[in-house]
Amino acid sequence: MKAGEIFSKTMPFCWAKLLLGLATVVISIVALAILMGIAWLFKNEVVYLIMFLIWLGVTGAVNFFINHYIGYLVKAGHVAVITEAVVTGKVPDNQVAYGKEKVKERFLTSNVYFVLDKLIGGAVRQLQRGFEKMGGTLGSIIPGMNFVVNIGKMFIGIALGYIDECCLGYTFLKNKQGAFKSATDGVVIYAENWKKLLKDAAKTTAIVVGLVIAVTLVLFLIFGLIVRLIPVENWLFGFAAFLFACFLAWVAKKAFIDSYMMISMMVSYMEEAPTYKIKFDLYSKLCGLSAKFKELFNKGQEESPGSQSAAAASSGNKTVFCGECGAKNDKGTKFCGSCGKPI
C-alpha cells in the first residue's frame, strides 16, 4: 500500500492524536482564565507575571502527561497497524482494537515501551550530535559552510526523527525475538540503508517545514485578532495568543503532518526491512558512537536465549557480541578481542 492510502485508512489514529492535543489546549485555556482572573482581582503587574509563570508550568505538566504518556501508546498502536498494512497490504477491520492488542502483546507493560522508545530516540540524537561536531569543524575551514551545515542539520533532524517509529515497527514485524533485540537490529538496518531512506525523506521534509510555518502564521493571525478585540491592555495576553498559535500548530503537526511523514518513512523502511539481511557489523561502531545505542544493545543481549541476533542465528550461533563494546567474537571466547572485557 502507498503512504497516502495508509494515511487515509488509518485516520482514526490521527483524530485520536488531534483530540489529545486539543484536550491539552482546552485545559490550558481554562487554567489561563482562572489564573488571570485571580491576577485581575489584585490588579498588580507582578501578580500577573507570577500567575502567567504558574500557567506555563501547569500547561507543561498537562502536556507531558497527555501527549507523552497516553500519546505514546496511541502512536505505538498506529505503528502496529501501519506495519500490518505495509506488509500484508490490508488495514485490520477494527484497527484501534488491533493496535491496542498488538502493543499489549509485544510489550506486556507500557513501561517496556517507554524505555525502548527513549533509548532509540536518545541514540538518534547522539548520532545527530556527531554530525553537528563534524559540521562545526567544516564550518571553521570553509567560508559559508555553517549555513549549509545548519540546513543539513535541520533536514537530518526531521528525517531521523522517525527512526524510532521505523524500529518500533520492526519489533512488531520480528515478534519471535525480544523487543530490545529487534529494535537494535532495526537501528542497524536503518543505518545500512540511510542513503535510500534520507533520499525518500527529502521528498516530504520541505512540505513539513512549509506547512508548519503556514499553520502557525494563520493561527497567530486568528488569535492576534481575538486578543485585539479584548478590552484589556496587557502584553501577556498578546504573548499568550502567540503561544496558543504555536501550540495549536504543534497539535496539528503532531496529528496530521507527523503522521503522514511517519507513514512515508515507515513505508520506505518496510520495503527493505522484512527480508533484509544485515551485511555489516555496525553494532560495535554504533555502540562507540552512542551510549544510548550501547544500552539498547546490552538490554537486547540480556533478553531470553530465544532472542539471539540475526547475525548469530545465520551463522549457526557461532558468533557472539561483546556486551561492553558490541564487537563480534567467536563463540566460546572468554575475553573480547576489541576491548578486552570478559564476555
Image: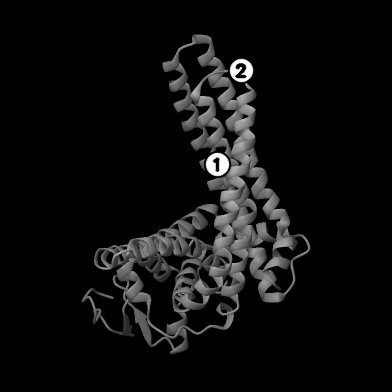
Total number of numbered discs in the rendering: 2
- Image position of 20 with respect to 73: above or below: above
| Left or right of 296 in this view: 167 | right
Tell me if residue 105 can be seen: no
Q: Which residue is mark 2?
A: 231
Q: Amino acid at mark 2?
A: Pro
What is the x, y in percent for residue 136?
29, 62
Mark 2 surroundings within 10 Å by alpha-carbon count, few (fewer than 14), some (14 through 19), many (20 or more) = few
What is the x, y in percent for residue 336?
25, 79
Q: Quadrant of residue 302?
A: bottom left
Give me the residue at 35% from left, 72% from top: 286
Q: Amino acid at mark 1?
A: Cys
The colour scheme used to paint the residues is: one colour
Helix, strand or loop at label 2? It is loop
- Looking at the picture, tell me which residue is in the foreground, 304 or 244: 244
- Image position of 326 with respect to 148: above or below: below
Spatial separation of the CA atoms under disc 2 and disc 1: 23 Å
Q: Nearer the viewer, mark 2 or mark 1?
A: 2
- Image position of 266 with respect to 217: above or below: below
Tell me if residue 10 can be seen: yes
Quadrant position of the C terminus in the picture: bottom left
Quadrant position of the N terminus in the picture: bottom right
Helix, strand or loop at label 1? It is helix
Mark 1 surroundings within 10 Å by alpha-carbon count, few (fewer than 14), some (14 through 19), many (20 or more) = some
User: From this viewpoint, which residue is outermost toward the left?
Assistant: 340
- Image position of 258 with respect to 190: above or below: above
Give me the residue at 67% from left, 73% from top: 86
What is the x, y in percent for residue 320?
36, 81
Asked if the residue under mark 1 is in contact with the one under mark 2, i.e. CB atoms within 8 Å, the reply is: no
| Left or right of 3 in this view: 64 | left
Say whether disc 2 or disc 1 marks the residue closer to the N-terminus: 2
Q: Which residue is mark 1?
A: 246
